[in-house]
Amino acid sequence: MRTSLYSILCIVVRVGAILLLVKTMVGLPLALSSVRGGQFGPGAQDMVIGFTGALVALASALWLYPGLLARLASTQRSREIFESPISAAQLQYVAFAVLGVAFAMDALLDLVAFGMRAALTFGLHDPAYEGLRLEDRARVGAQVAKLVLGIALAAGSRGLVGLLRGLRENGLPQALAADLEEDVDSVKLK
C-alpha cells in the first residue's frame, strides 16, 4: 500500500472521533440521572444536553474533516508517500480493533473499581451503601454497554470496515422496484 503519514493521521483522528462519540453517548444517561435530582438548578439538564450536542457535533466534524486536525499535527514532509505491506483495509481493521479493546479495558477497569467500592462500603456497613447502590446502577449499565460495544468492535472490525467501504462506494442501499411491488401486493391482499 502506498500511503503517507498524513493519511494515517486522518485514520487516527477518525478513530478518536468515534471514541469521543461513544464516550459521550455512554456518559449521557449517567449525567442526566445526576442532574435530575434538582440539586444543580433548573437549567442543569438543558446544559448537559447542550454540552452533549456540542460534543456530538465535534465528533461529527472530526469524522467528516479529519484533515484539519491532521494538518495541524503534521508537517509538509508528512505528505511524502511511502510503501507499506499493510493494505488500507488491514490498517482500518487494526484501528477499529484497538479502539474496541480500549473501550473494553476502560469498562473493565471501571467495573472493577465499582466492585471494590461496593464491597468496601457493604463490608464496613456504611449507611451510604444504599445510596451508592442506587446511584451506580446507571454507571454499571453504561460500563457493561461499553464493554459489550468494545468486544463487538474488536471482534467485528472486518465487518465494520466492509460496511463503511460499501457505503462509501455504493452509497445507501436503494429499494428495488420489485420489492416495492411485492409489498404493495401483500397489503392489497390483506
Image (tube, rainbow, N blue to C red):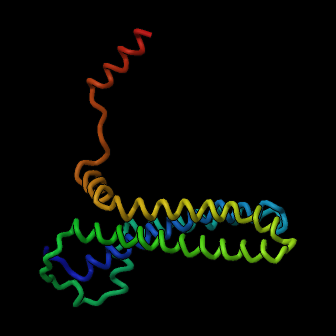
Q: Is residue 81 above or below residue 66?
A: below
x and y percentages locating residue 124 in the rendered image: 81, 77
Q: Residue at x 21, y 84 (%)?
A: 79
x and y percentages locating residue 137 in the rendered image: 69, 61
User: Is 190 left, or right, of 12 in this rendering?
Assistant: right
x and y percentages locating residue 130 in the rendered image: 82, 65
Front-lying residue, 78 or 76? 78
x and y percentages locating residue 123 in the rendered image: 78, 75
Which quadrant would the N terminus be assigned to in this image? bottom left
Q: Residue at x 40, y 71 (%)?
A: 99
Instruction: Using the rendered view, name the quadrant where residue 37 is placed.
Output: bottom right
Q: In the orientation shown, which residue stands out farthest toward the top? A: 189
Q: Is residue 187 above or below residue 9?
A: above
Front-lying residue, 91 or 12? 91
Q: Is residue 82 above or below residue 97?
A: below
Q: In the orientation shown, which residue stands out farthest toward the right? A: 127
User: Is 109 left, or right, of 168 in this rendering?
Assistant: right
Q: Residue at x 66, y 72 (%)?
A: 114
User: Is 29 left, or right, of 175 in this rendering?
Assistant: right
Which quadrant would the C terminus be assigned to in this image? top left
Instruction: Using the rendered view, name the quadrant where residue 111 is placed.
Output: bottom right
Query: Total label count?
Result: 0
Q: Residue at x 61, y 65 (%)?
A: 27
Instruction: Using the rendered view, name the quadrant where residue 151 is placed.
Output: bottom left
